[in-house]
Structures are given as C-alpha cells and as structure tokens.
Image (cartoon, rainbow, N blue to C red):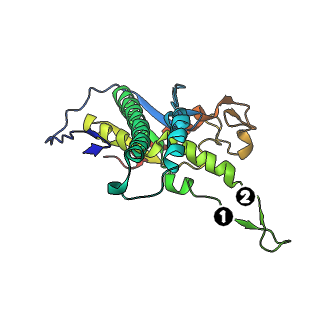
Amino acid sequence: KREGHKWFVVLTAEQDRPQPLPATGSVAGIDVGIAHFLADSNGAFVPNPCHGRRGAAKLQVAQQVLARFPRRKAKDRTANHRRAVDKVAQLHGKVRRQRLDHAHKTALSLVRAHDFIAHEDLKIRNMNKAPAPRPDPGQAGAFLANGAAAKAGLNTSIHDAGWGVFLTILHAKAESAGREVIAVDPRNTSRTCPECGHTAKENRPTQEKFHCLSCGHTAHADTVGATNVLRAGLVRRNANPA
C-alpha cells in the first residue's frame, strides 16, 4: 500500500492452529480512559501518550499553509501545493503509526501477562456524538449553552486515545495466543464499591477519586472500575463456560 510517497508491504500468513502462550494463572480487568490510557485491576496504570495532541502544533501550521492554496484536482496543483498536501498527510500518518504502535505494545503486554482479560463493552461511536442543540424558549432563534465546546474537546481526546483500535488488536492477539477476552456492560463500574457493593453517583466525587459513602472505602476511581469490570467478566465467563 502507498501512504504519500512511501510504500509499505503487507504480508498475511495463515495458520491452522495458533501456538498458545504458557498459562500464567493471572486474570485482569482493564478500564480505558483519557487521563491514563488504561488502569488494571491490579492497580497498575498505562500512561496516555497523547500522540495527536503532541503533534497538533505542527499539524496546525501545515494545515494553515495548505489552506492558502485554492482547492484543485491533484493534476492541476503546483509544486508548492503538492508539497503542502504531502506535509499534512505525512503528519497524519506519523500520528496514526504512533497510535498503532502503542496499541500493539500495550495489548501484547496484557496478553503475555494474563490468561483472562475483561474490558468494558464501549459504544465509542455513540460516545462521540455531539450534544443536541437547546433552543431558548424565551427568545426565538436563540439557543442555550449545551456543552458542545467541552464535548468537542472530549471527543478529540477519545479519538486520540484510539480505544477502538486498541481493543480490536487486543482481541486479535488474545485469540492467537490462546487467551480469553470478554467485554462487559460498563454501567456503574466506576460507581460501585468493590468492598460492599454500594452504588451511587456520589461515590465518585472527582474524576480520579473513589470514596464509598456506605463503608468509607477509598481508591483510584479507574482501579475501582477495572476491579468491577474483572468481576463482571468472571461472572459472565462462569455463566457461559466454553
């Protein structure tokens, strides 16, 4: 395949039966996020590299340069116009490859360390939807604030994290390594106390802090979410034995 002026060779090999990795006896639940790329049920965190955010300044400059040229077909572009197009494509390609590389390495680390991995069954496309407009009942043609600007920033962060690509790669690597990966319902995973089972929105006073109002248990909210994801995954596995 060709990306810009670079060519890449893609090889596909078929295997009758993948060679499974040796059993580790370890299980884990993971909770993907933005502040951290993911947290696991053992209390470990994988930092979010934010490749898109780190390359945003260079991409913005390149896009501004490209915007100065009128829209034309490729055969009608000047040499400077073609260079501007190639620069934007090059920067997009670099971020895409960085994101893919991070997803592969993170998934491989999880698959090597754990026999069973549970994660949230996220509907990422629905999470990226823009909020509906709020018409102002007191003024015709006017609209109330609906948090669209903040939601746009969140959508950018979700896209930059690349959860969908990572989970797809995780399932593929787990299958080839003889590991088991299960997706579970994400509702209330970060609001339910893993110690007493009390569920309330107030149990999570901040993005990172979890404090159970019933038993007083405190922990990092993402670790709590990963723990509850693991428990739900084990319940689902035991209910549907292979």
Q: Can the viewer see residue 208 in this picture?
A: yes
Task: Please determine whether, in this image, residue 142 is positioned above or below residue 126.
Answer: below
Question: In the visual, does 4 lie left or right of 57?
Answer: left
Q: Furthest residue to the right? A: 138
Query: Number of marks in the image?
Result: 2
Q: Position of residue 203 (x, y in %)?
A: 72, 40
Task: Please determine whether, in this image, residue 218 is positioned above or below residue 186.
Answer: above
Q: Furthest residue to the front? A: 78
Q: Residue at x 54, y 39 (%)?
A: 61
The quarter holding residue 114 reads: top left
Q: Nearer the viewer, residue 190 or 206?
A: 206
Query: Which amino acid is tagged 2?
Result: Asn
Q: Position of residue 213 (x, y in %)?
A: 76, 38
Mark 1 vs 2, N-terminal side: 1
Dots 1 and 2: beta carbons under 8 Å?
Answer: yes
On the image, numbered disc 2 is attached to which residue? Answer: 146
Q: Residue at x 54, y 37 (%)?
A: 56
Q: Position of residue 111 (x, y in %)?
A: 35, 31
Question: In the visual, does 95 lie left or right of 33?
Answer: left
The quarter holding residue 237 reads: top left
On the image, numbered disc 1 is attached to which residue? Answer: 132
Q: Position of residue 230 (x, y in %)?
A: 49, 38
Task: Please determine whether, in this image, residue 164 is positioned above or below residue 207.
Answer: below
Q: Secondary structure at mark 2?
A: loop
Q: Residue at x 41, y 46 (%)?
A: 85
Q: CA distance from mark 1 to mark 2?
A: 7 Å
Query: Which amino acid is tagged 1?
Result: Ala
Q: Secondary structure at mark 1?
A: loop
Q: Nearer the viewer, residue 151 or 75?
A: 75
